[in-house]
Amino acid sequence: MKKIIVPTKDEVDAKAKTIFGDLESKLGIVPNLYATMGYSSEVLAGYLSYAEVISASNFTKKETEAIKLAVSEVNNCEYCKAAHTAIAKMNGFTEQETIAIRKAQLSDKRTNLLVEAAQQIAANKGKLSEELKELFFEEGFDNKALVDLVAIVNVTSFTNFLHNATQVPIDFPLAPDLENYAA
């Protein structure tokens, strides 16, 4: 069975090397999943550009991380659950709240609605029930917010799928196992 190895800077093309350098200066490291994208410098550049554009969405950084963690749970991506648990904590969530996000059981109604909608979109190939869509708009979200939400689900699903396909080593602390937490 072929094992996908995380490439080093010397194993990617010049464009990816430049991007790796930029990532190292911004993040201090090149996360393994980004490095793996470096096999296709076009995909890495496109992904980072798309992710940056999407970060200017209607949602706060905290809400965006909740969405990304919720989607990673649906897609059962261990790498992204680990990464987005760590980033969610950096954005003000507690460990218990990261568990609640993954279970769509947050006490904050607005954020939990985003989590539920994101999970439904991810689980149902983009489909959102009329009931949940109505609640989304009643909460004060608009058409732009819906487009932004679908885009965040999309960009997160890409990284989820890439890790699920490659199984490269996880370079973040593992997310807690939900089975260890009561419902």
Image: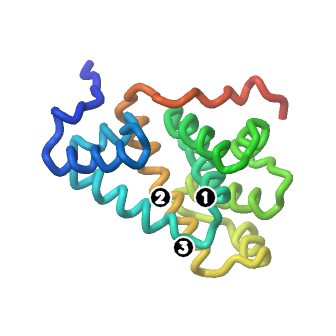
Please state which amino acid type lies under the numbered disc 3: Val
Please tell me which of labels 1 and 2 falls first in the chain. Answer: 1
Residue nearest the observer in this picture, 156 or 8 = 8
Is residue 129 toward the left or the right of residue 107 in the image? left
Of discs 3 and 1, which sits in the foreground? 1
Residue at which label 3 appears: 147
Badge 2 or badge 3: first in the primary sequence: 3
Disc 2 residue type (three-letter): Asn
| Mark nearer the N terminus (3 vs 1) | 1
Q: Is residue 136 above or below residue 125?
A: below
Residue most toward the left?
Answer: 14
User: In what quadrant of the picture does the C terminus appear?
Assistant: top right
| Residue for point 72% across, 71% down | 136
Q: Position of residue 119 (x, y in %)?
A: 63, 53
Closest to the observer, 22 or 155: 22
Above or below, comparing residue 58 to residue 86 in the picture: below
Task: Tell me the amino acid under the disc marked 1.
Answer: Thr
